[in-house]
């Protein structure tokens, strides 16, 4: 062996033995991911180490700054919603009370009364309402997106923001550096020239954190004048309006909110903005009651050892007694979720799943199909959406509890991404989601258990292979 070969071998062994303890310490929440990364590092001593540094670091520490932020300043970002908070009531059904207490612990607060919530199922209408709110803005516009395309749709909305900034409205724009990688200086400079504050959300600011391109800010949040907020699954770009010929029709679900929960969306934006820029946004006034919906904003990210959305989804599935409707774009669930769905069906719950079909990315599609057999045999109903691309992320149980937001039912959303969503304790909205599920099912293919069990062995192998990568999907 040459001298260079010896050096490379020593480097490979050094990286292997130095990274294995890091894997064990960082992957406590997901043992399957730990095993997958340890095998990769051992079998590919140098290449595996590089892959782990790029994709395997799934914890982001809020960076320390020379300028320390006082406890009072950080606390000022928390919205004042106490008068509107809604803890469990004596006449609450036991399941509702348990879900309220769980959400209170993982989301650090009770839900609030007095919200006006509009369920948006048409992307053209959603964009029109966002543009309408921006046009009416008088003081501030805060936008946070995973994907913002520099195409006709993205440019049109950018120019609207530029016009408002020139009118004196304070505009802050935060975008994910990976998802919005097509945004270049040529697109952003006119925004800066107009006075818009633009920031990129990266996995981190230190060299070590920049290596981990695996962590993404998947949130979609708009807050206008601390009065109205939008959130859900829809990004900004031509494809989200069905203008991509290859994808075709785009099916998404979004929310428009007024009331106390607007402040909580502002708090999420303020935290992410501080992380990206170091600027502490000033406190906002309390938001008055605007409707009669009880809601709770929830956020999650790879900064704690608790997966908030996995905890919420598992609890909701386990509390279901009659029916469960789940729609998701990427369905590559961890085994815990699969078991919970099976058990719900075994208990007699009507479990109905709507997932994106042929327009989906092939690897997560195959990984999700690998668990169809288990779910179908338990009695779950599975539809694959075929009209276009299904991008909704919704969960409804028993016609009274719903979750709408940005997280898909995959390990990336549950363990790696920064996500946000809204829990809705409202029968009318749950009914709307169930009705929309029924309409979407008409554009989907029902998976028949008998015909599915007769699919070819090549498909079996492909599904099982992709399932191995579920912790990374």
Image (cartoon, rainbow, N blue to C red):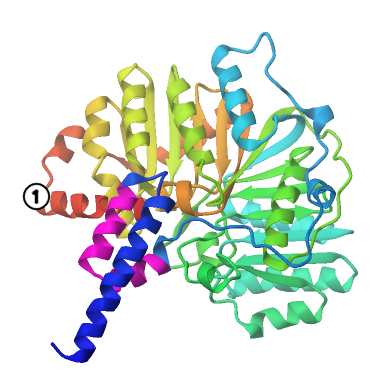
> Where in the figure is residue 367, as x and y percent of width and height?
28, 50
- In this picture, which residue range is highlighted in magenta? 32-53
> Toward the viewer: 3 or 322?
3
Q: Does residue 199 show up?
A: yes
Left or right of 194? Residue 323 is left
Image quadrant occupied by the C terminus? bottom left
Is residue 390 in view? no
Q: Residue furthest top?
A: 91
* Local secondary structure at mark 1: helix
- The residue lying at 74 percent from left, 49 percent from top is 267
Quadrant location of the N terminus? bottom left
The secondary structure that most of the magenta stretch takes on is helix
Residue at image position (64%, 62%) is 63
User: Residue visible at 57% across and 40% down?
Assistant: 404
51 within the magenta span:
yes
| Image location (x, y in percent) of residue 221 | 66, 54
Which of the 4 image quarters holds residue 371? top left
In the image: residue 311, left or right of residue 62:
left
| Residue drawn at 75 percent across, 50 percent down | 266
Point out residue 199 in the picture as x, y percentages from the top left corner. Answer: 69, 70
Q: Position of residue 223 (x, y in %)?
A: 75, 53
Q: Residue 197 magenta-drawn? A: no
Image-based side of 82 in relation to 52, left or right: right
Nearest the eye: 457 or 177: 177
**Mark 1: few/some/many CA within 10 Å (<14, 14-19, 20+):** few
Residue highlighted by disc 1: 457
The image shows a total of numbered marks equal to 1
Q: Nearer the viewer, residue 31 or 360?
A: 31
């Amino acid at each position: 062996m040459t001298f260079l070969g010896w050096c490379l071998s020593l480097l490979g062994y050094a990286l292997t033995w130095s990274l294995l303890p890091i894997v064990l310490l960082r992957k406590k929440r997901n043992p399957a991911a730990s095993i997958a990364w340890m095998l990769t590092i051992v079998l590919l001593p140098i290449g595996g180490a590089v892959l782990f540094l790029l994709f395997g670091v799934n914890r982001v520490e809020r960076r320390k700054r020379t300028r320390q932020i006082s406890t009072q300043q950080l606390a000022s970002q928390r919205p004042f919603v106490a008068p509107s908070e809604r803890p469990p009531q004596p006449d609450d059904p036991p399941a509702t009370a348990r879900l309220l207490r769980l959400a209170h612990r993982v989301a650090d607060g009770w839900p609030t009364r007095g919200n006006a919530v509009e369920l948006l199922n048409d992307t053209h209408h959603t964009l029109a309402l966002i543009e309408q709110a921006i046009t009416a803005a008088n003081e501030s516009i805060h936008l946070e997106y995973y994907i913002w395309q520099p195409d006709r749709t993205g440019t049109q909305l950018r120019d609207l923001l530029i016009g408002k900034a020139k009118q004196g409205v304070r505009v802050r724009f935060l975008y994910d550096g990976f998802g919005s990688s097509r945004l270049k200086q040529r697109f952003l400079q006119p925004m800066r020239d107009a006075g818009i504050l633009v920031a990129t959300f990266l996995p981190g600011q230190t060299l070590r954190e920049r290596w981990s391109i695996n962590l993404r800010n998947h949130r979609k949040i708009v807050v206008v004048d601390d009065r109205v907020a939008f959130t859900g699954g829809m990004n900004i770009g031509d494809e989200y309006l069905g203008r991509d010929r290859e994808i075709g029709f785009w099916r998404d679900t979004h929310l428009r909110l007024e009331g106390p929960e607007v402040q909580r969306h502002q708090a999420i934006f303020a935290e992410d903005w501080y992380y990206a820029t170091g600027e502490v946004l000033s406190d906002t006034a309390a938001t008055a009651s605007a409707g009669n919906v009880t809601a709770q904003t929830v956020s999650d990210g790879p900064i704690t050892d608790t997966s908030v959305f996995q905890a919420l989804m598992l609890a909701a599935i386990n509390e279901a007694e009659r029916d469960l409707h789940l729609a998701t774009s990427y369905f590559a669930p961890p085994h815990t979720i699969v078991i919970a769905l099976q058990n719900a069906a075994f208990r007699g719950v009507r479990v109905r799943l709507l997932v994106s079909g042929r327009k989906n990315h092939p690897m997560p599609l195959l990984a999700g199909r690998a668990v169809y057999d288990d779910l179908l045999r338990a009695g779950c109903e599975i539809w694959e959406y075929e009209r276009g691309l299904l991008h909704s992320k919704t969960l409804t149980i028993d016609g009274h509890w719903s979750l709408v937001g940005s997280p898909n039912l995959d390990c990336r959303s549950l363990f790696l991404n920064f996500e946000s969503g809204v829990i809705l304790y409202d029968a009318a909205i749950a009914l709307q989601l169930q009705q929309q599920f029924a309409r979407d099912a008409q554009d989907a293919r029902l998976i028949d258990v008998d015909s599915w069990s007769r699919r070819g062995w090549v498909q079996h192998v492909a599904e099982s292979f992709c399932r191995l990568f579920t912790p990374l999907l």
